[in-house]
Amino acid sequence: MAELYRDDPALALDVINDVIAGGDQGELLTVLRQLTQAFGGVQAVAGQAGLNPTQLYRTLSAQGNPALSSLTSILKAMGLRLAVRPL
């Protein structure tokens, strides 16, 4: 999936928006892990997000529960952002 996201950023955007709309946190963390690989891996994304790589591993783990500030930093490192839209 990481290679698909790297080759097709629009697909990555569609997938992450669908996951967020569905509200499944586990699926969101899975997609964020895949996107992290597409954007150069944990070291690269952690550096861009201003996070410790170990913190990023934990945040995106299956048991992770990212704070809003971490989530927005991770997305920003990937050139993405959260947005609120009407239903």
Image (spheres, rainbow, N blue to C red):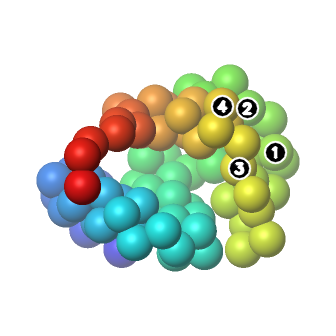
Question: For mark 4, what is the residue?
Answer: 69
Q: Is residue 63 left or right of residue 9?
A: right
Q: Amino acid at mark 3?
A: Pro
* Label 4 neighbour load within 10 Å: few <14, some 14-19, many 20+: few
Residue placed under numbered mark 1 in the picture:
55
Precedes in sequence: disc 1 or disc 4: 1
Q: Earlier in the sequence, mark 2 or mark 4?
A: 2
Q: What kind of element bears circle 2?
A: loop
The residue pinned by badge 3 equals 66
Image point (36%, 63%), residue name: 21
The kind of residue on which mark 2 rests is: Leu
Q: Amino acid at mark 1?
A: Gln
Q: Which amino acid does the dot numbered 4 rest on?
A: Ser
Residue under label 2, please give it: 51
Residue 79 place in picture, x, y as percent: 35, 33
Tags 1 and 2 touching, CB below 8 Å: yes
Other residues around mark 1 within 10 Å, as few (<14) / some (14–19) / many (≥20)? some
Residue at coordinates 26% horizontally, 43% vertically from top-left?
85
Furthest toward the front, the residue is 87
- Marks 4 and 3 close (CB-CB < 8 Å): no
Corner quadrant of residue 2: bottom left
Q: Nearer the viewer, mark 1 or mark 4?
A: 4
- Label 3 – label 2 distance at C-alpha: 12 Å
Query: What is the secondary structure assignment of the residue under circle 4?
Result: helix
Q: Marks 3/1: CA distance? A: 10 Å
Q: Of the residues tagged 3 and 1, which is closer to the observer?
A: 3
In the picture, measured across the screen, residue 35 lies left or right of residue 62, that is left
- Seen in the image, is 8 located left or right of residue 12? left
Q: Alpha carbon of mark 4 to alpha carbon of mark 3: how far?
A: 8 Å
Horizontal relation, residue 1 to residue 49: left or right: left
Helix, strand or loop at label 1? It is helix
